[in-house]
Image (tube, rainbow, N blue to C red):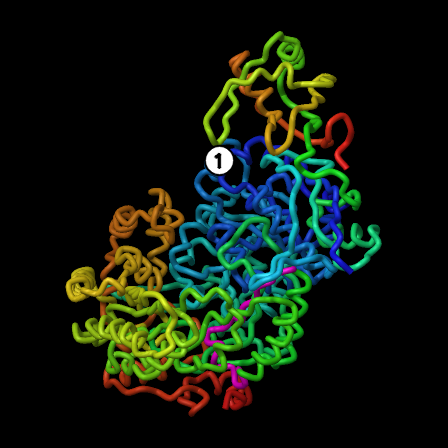
Amino acid sequence: MPSVNTRAFFSKTGRAKYISHLDLSSVVIRAMKRTRLPIWQTEGFNPRTYVTFMLPLSLGQEGLHEAMDFRLIEDVPYSEVREKLNAALPPDIQVTEITVPRDKNTDITAARYHIISSADPEKLRQLCEKEQINVEKRTKKGSTIVDLKPLMTDVEQQGEELFVTLPAGNTFNINPSLIFEAYSAEYGEPVKRLRIIRTNIYSGDREFE
Amino acid sequence: MSENLYTNKAMMEQLDEFLLEVQKPSRYIGGEHGAVIKNKCKVDIRFAFCFPDTYEIGMSHLGMKILYGLKNAVPNYWCERVFMPLPDMEEQMRARNIPLYALESLDPIKDFDFIGFTLQYEMSFTNILEMLDLAGVPVLAKDRTGLTPIVMAGGPCVCNPEPLADFIDFFAIGEGEEMNLEFMRLMEQCKKEGATRQEFLRRAAQIEGIYVPSLYDVDYNLDGTVKSITPKDGAPATVRKRIIKDFDKVYAPENFVVPFTQIVHDRAVIEVLRGCIRGCRFCQAGFIYRPYREKQKDTILHNLKALCENTGYDEVSLSSLSTGDYKDIVGLLTELTDYTSAEKINLSLPSLRIDRFSDEVLKKITDVRKSGLTFAPEGGTQRIRDVINKNVTEKNVMDSVRIAFEGGYTNIKLYFMMGLPTETMEDVEGVYNMAKAVIEEFYATPNHAKGRPGVAVSLSTFIPKPFTPFEFEPQLDEAGVKERQAHLKSINNDRKIVISWSKYDLSLIEAVLARGDRRLGKAIYLAWQKGCKLDGWDEYFKFDKWIEAIKECGLAPAFYANRRRPYDEVAPWSHIDMLVSREFLIEENKRAHEGVTTPNCREKCSNCGVAKCVGGEICRAIR
């Protein structure tokens, strides 16, 4: 049987939010080894379990619907794959769904976030309603000024909780923490408590599948 | 995720506020695969296993994994891990009044029944003080009042526990597998009875291997040497170390806590044997871990399989003082590699003696990255190697490097010691000559790999340790060390040979602490108050502060480090019995000065005293 590309959606919450993107792959690969599931390894001298992660999650942020791909070399019921992975993974990383991939990681365009912060709700609302929300975005190549306003869509606020959709993907990605950098700059006060949870990933106007 | 019910939510929230601001936060949060979480309502005894160094180092330590698994196998005991936070983390914790907590429950360790430290290395002593203080527990044993927490320590350094007598309530001398459960049971009983701290300690002192320093009075002579050590309250006159008699059946962990982040030794580790047959005279481990015991092949294979399956590691190493001494090493490796090759697991053997390094063994090690190999001749000439009883010849070294070069290696690392007893400049030059001979051997090997050979020579300053034949010896002073280093530097004109040495300053303090007495407790306390911590780390080590502290106590480093100790002097550790007799150590010291070697335990029993203590059958099995 040729190997079949398989996608797992998983959550990374609680203590697992402190696992860096780099460390995540070894955490997951070791868990896969523990399951003894027929997962494809690279050929060659140093065979390695092949896993790719769709969209990096910043250190300290949680994710409820993260995606990773691997290849199965034997037919195993998806429910079994999920159960075995969950038994082997650390308690704060758990697989929610196994699917056949439909989209490529380059198809990712946006992500939705649920943010709970100690920012003053009224000030946060005023910030979100401004005509322009300019903030400095730092990348490897240097920094640019970005206007967040047109990039923030489906904004909902309930007290200290904020729901927002932002551009995501390999080419253009906006980290939701930028909203709170803009907040600090605007009001001259730091946001002490900030919990960011990525709740979904989109491909165009539908969910990433 | 019911497990999360059992962790301290309030602490988690506090940590969430700043953990992203510290380096590598995942080492401060726990939650790894294999971490044991229990319902604390159903737990009677809680043990905080403290490794007085960073997470990366402590998590690489096999002894901690053994005792962690062993204690947690008892349903109503819960053992958790604690490590030394680095300064950025510590600063945050102190600023926010967060006491030192354990990684499993995130509960403050001051509320535990036991706070246990493992003493792997003298230069971690100040970390113990720092960790206790950070935990909110009085640093001095005399200032602690309630029944709990009891602060205890085990590990190799406790063979001379005296410098830490002021801080530790009791020491566990020797192998901990049985003792740990015994003193935990005693605590269970004492809690039920409502016993006092003193009562617990008095009763603990009756357990073989347990040393309660407050139950001993030490008197000194006018010259500062120990006059007498007197037990009180029924404590034994000598405390004999514990050993596991049926080593093959001893508890071995079948699962490890698998860290989220890279640690120093990030792999499965299997203990194959304990003790060492060799008797190298400088090596403390070679004497204090006697007698030599092996596990059976089946036991090792079973353990290796279980561990690899449960952890998911694709690298496993065999751990011991000298793995090559395993009686049927080729047979063992054949069985193990049958499994590891099929599972694509990398098997490594870190502690191979030069004279046990054969073609056959090398082929079995499926180490695919052929970069470098390390050998430890320890001394540069045959004369000095005879003095230290290393029993390795230049031919052994050359045979081994040839096999390595034939096997595709190009780089060799050689370990030596500087300042060994009776050492002359000729012995120092011998180090360089051997490195040069290794380079020549590379070119003389017909089928050597392409590329330039390299020899990295690493020299450490010899530190005399208790319970070795060299415990009577002075450590070479600074002038002597500098002179030897300069000489080596001046004669090395080969760019393929790189010579490096350990810092003298560090080895002096280590030498002071290793053979120190109780009076040094004050110096350790003062050094810590002056900011000494993480002393094993070059960037944090404060030599000047240490010297200041020692002098302020009216003590002199040279008294402890650079003085020849007469055979009849009362050693500060003379009430500790590591099974190896003092007469044997004296005899071995004399033989060293005569340049006479001693056969290893497999060749012939040299009557070190261990056989008499443990019954001859363990020792007879060696041969």
Indicate yes or no whether the magenta region holds residue B322.
Answer: yes
Determine whether B598 is above or below B266 in the image. Answer: below
Residue B425 is drawn in which quadrant? bottom left
Graded by Cα atoms within 10 Å as few (under 14), some (14 to 19) or many (20 or more), the crowding at tag 1 reads few
Q: Amino acid at mark 1?
A: Arg
> Mark 1 belongs to which subunit?
B
In this rendering, position of residue B118 left or right of residue A203: left
Residue B131 versus residue A160: which sits nearer the camera?
A: A160
Residue in the picture at 38% in, 56% down: B123
The magenta stretch spans residue B623: no
Q: Position of residue A146 (x, y in %)?
A: 55, 18
- Specify whether B599 is left or right of B306: left
Q: Residue at x 27, y 71 (%)?
A: B435
How far from the left and from the top, in percent, is residue A36? 73, 61
Q: What residue sits right under mark 1 in the picture?
A: B94
Which stretch did the figure color magenta? B312-329
| Location of residue B466 by image quarter | bottom left
The residue sitting at 49% across, 82% down in the picture is B360
